[in-house]
Image: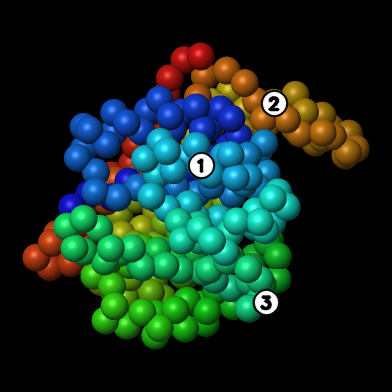
Amino acid sequence: MKILVIGDIVGKPGRRAVRNILPGLREDYILDFVIANGENASGGRGLNRDGMQELFACGIDVLTMGNHVWDNKEIFEFIDEQPGIIRPCNYPVSNPGQGYHIYTLNNGYRIAVINASGRVFMDNLDCPFEKTENVLREIDNKADFIIADFHAEATSEKLAFAYYFDGRVNAVLGTHTHIQTADERILTKGTAYITDLGMTGPVNSILGVEINAVIKKFLTAQPVRFEVAKGPVQLQGVILTLADSTRKIENISRISIEMPN
């Protein structure tokens, strides 16, 4: 069984990359399931209904989120009715949405997708370690495979999270920094890991944003309006190969595909 997990989708360019690249990946790799981080998919911050529907129509099964989950207020209108959207499980319990969900595939396998947010250089949410522990207790013996999107800034926090849950989840996949790392591997107890899946969006950008705007921000320390960059786009992420017989990850492979305008 093969699962594609796509790095942070940024704005219209990111959705265009998904629309044009994902169908070929589904066919070439015979994908069984597709997960993507969608917290920046609408206008570069947050997710609206149109963006969600477009990404689901492209073949994405689950959209995880992150610290920008509430940036587009329209999400409050539909997040509770969408089982395909997962927001970080360590937000206060009063928040709408869900921190995990179990999906049943056509082949009968059950995949639990968990989303958690880090706290180093991020919002001071509830402890992601404790909250994910709670989720694992809730889904005990209810899922065949468990995939966690850990949306965090610090590499140390991501590694600590991965080693803490090594052998108890099938994959810990980092998102948020928009820079794909070259450290994909399977940890000693069997959990697949990468520090960051990368970004799906404009290639010639700074984290998906127009280059000159970001440079001006660094040079002047003045408020600058960030706009999603234009031009060639890319799709980045990993493909997980899972063994049906052992319910373990056999392989984790990075992908990075560019396409012109």
Identify the amino acid type marked 2: Ile
Comparing marks 1 and 2, which lies closer to the viewer?
1
Quarter assignment of residue 192? bottom left
Mark 2 is surrounded, within 10 Å at the Cα level, by few (under 14), some (14 to 19) or many (20 or more) other residues, namely some
User: Is residue 146 shown above or below 224?
Assistant: below
Q: Earlier in the sequence, mark 1 or mark 3?
A: 1
Mark 3 vs mark 2, foreground winner is 3
Badge 1 amino acid: Gln
Disc assigned to residue 94 = 3
On screen, residue 70 above or below 191 = above
* Amino acid on which disc 3 is placed: Ser
Residue 48 appears left or right of 26: right
Left or right, residue 221 beside residue 86: right
Residue ID for mark 1: 53
Q: CA distance from mark 1 to mark 2?
A: 29 Å
In the image, residue 118 sits, relative to residue 241, either above or below, namely below
> Which image quadrant for residue 12?
top right
Q: Position of residue 237 (x, y in %)?
A: 39, 42
Q: Earlier in the sequence, mark 3 or mark 2?
A: 3
Dot label at residue 243: none
Question: Which structural element holds mark 2?
Answer: helix
Query: At x 47% / y 76%, what residue is drawn?
Result: 132
Counting residues from the N terminus, which is met first, the one under dot 1 or under dot 2?
1
The residue mark sitting in front, 1 or 3, is 1
Dot 3 lies on which element?
A: loop
Q: CA distance from mark 3 to mark 2?
A: 38 Å
> Residue 164, image x and y in percent?
41, 76
**Label placed on residue 211:** 2
Q: Residue furthest top?
A: 261
Quick one: SS at disc 1? Answer: helix
